[in-house]
Amino acid sequence: MAGDLRRYARQTQVRLITGGLFLLFIVGDGLILLLYGPQAAALGLICLLVGLAPLALIWLALVGIEWIVRKNAN
């Protein structure tokens, strides 16, 4: 394999996260919609977003730390 392995690993991670979020939001909330109706699906979507908020905040903090480290590395 002659390619850049770090780029490949990052690309694979992005694809796995995207697929997981797709399954969680589209398939999961779609099943809630089919089984329980639109009001339950709306509440399910709100719960999913609130549940993912801490993960998003942690990710933003890590991206910010990485940016600071790269900026001060020179």
Image (cartoon, helix red, strand yellow):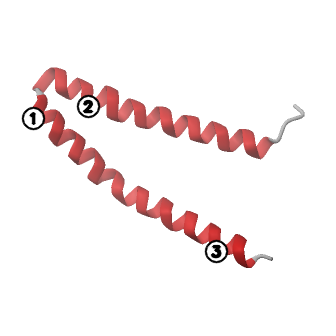
Residue located beneath label 3 in the image: 68
Residue located beneath label 1 in the image: 39
Q: Are marks 1 and 3 in contact (CB under 8 Å)?
A: no
Residue at 73 percent of width and 38 percent of height: 8
Residue 55 image offset from top left, x and y in percent: 41, 56
Viewer-closest of 27 and 38: 38
As helix, strand or loop, the secondary structure at mark 2 comes to: helix
Question: Badge 1: few (under 14), some or many (20 or more) residues near its Cα, within 10 Å?
Answer: few
User: Which residue lies most toward the right here?
Assistant: 2
Q: Could you tell me how far apart the alpha carbons at marks 3 and 2 are, in whole angstroms?
A: 37 Å
Q: Nearer the viewer, mark 3 or mark 2?
A: 3
Residue located beneath label 2 in the image: 29
Say what amino acid the circle numbered 2 marks. Answer: Asp
As helix, strand or loop, the secondary structure at mark 3 comes to: helix
Residue 12 as seen in the image, left or right of residue 43: right
Q: Earlier in the sequence, mark 2 or mark 1?
A: 2
Q: Earlier in the sequence, mark 3 or mark 2?
A: 2
Is 40 placed above or below 49 here?
A: above
Residue 47 image offset from top left, x and y in percent: 22, 47
Residue 54 as seen in the image, left or right of residue 13: left
Q: Could you tell me how far apart the alpha carbons at marks 1 and 3 are, in whole angstroms?
A: 43 Å
Q: Earlier in the sequence, mark 1 or mark 3?
A: 1
Residue 69 as seen in the image, left or right of residue 54: right
